[in-house]
Image: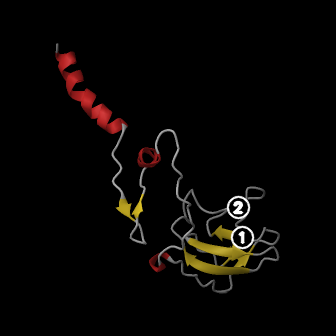
Amino acid sequence: MRFTAILALVAPLAAAIAEPEAAPMPNIDGETAITHPIALEREVGNAGSATVPDLTVREPPSGVELVARACSTNGCKCKKGLPQGQYCGNCVLISDGSWAITAKRVSTHIYECNPSGGCCDYGYAGDCGGLNARCR
């Protein structure tokens, strides 16, 4: 008896979760945007007889632009022969157990290395110093 009562209360909730209502929200241009695939299906129809509007690529709003970080040449050095790229200060080469950054190394900084051993320091990086460090 209790199971039937619980099932009767849960069934409408499960149906509501299975097919959420899409609430159209205005996009940047003030037009109504489709926010959920189910809403698109309802607008176009199951048969697909209506045409779906063309999608265009838009530039992000100016508030999300990335700012370049300066890479300072502070006397750091990289191990010669490393491929060009970014390495955290705590990177150790698997081949011989040596550090990727051989001079002026800070474990929580990210460095740009070139194959001839040149180096510059971008400064602190949140993913450096731990197990998920950028070590090519």
**Type of amino acid at the residue the image marks with label 2:** Arg
Q: Residue at x 66, y 68 (%)?
A: 87
Disc 1 marks which residue?
85
Residue lying furthest front in this view? 49
Which quarter of the image is occupied by the N terminus? top left
- The part of the image, by quadrant, that contains residue 115 is bottom right
What residue is at 51 percent from the left and 49 percent from the top? Answer: 50
C-alpha distance separating marks 2 and 1:
8 Å
Amino acid under disc 1: Gly
Callout 2 touching callout 1 (CB < 8 Å): yes
Q: Residue at x 42, y 45 (%)?
A: 42
Name the residue: 48% across, 39% down.
Answer: 46
Query: In what quadrant of the picture does the C terminus appear?
Result: bottom right
> Could you say where residue 11 lies in the image, as x and y percent from the top left?
27, 27
**Relative side of 48 to 98, left or right:** left
Q: With 11 as the anchor, is 38 left or right in this view?
A: right
Per the image, label 1 sits on a secondary structure element best described as strand
Q: Nearer the viewer, residue 106 or 41?
A: 41
Residue bearing mark 2: 136
Image coords of residue 86 (percent x, y):
67, 70
The correct choice, above or below, for 108 with respect to 48 in the image is: below
Q: Which of 60 and 77 is in front in this view?
A: 60
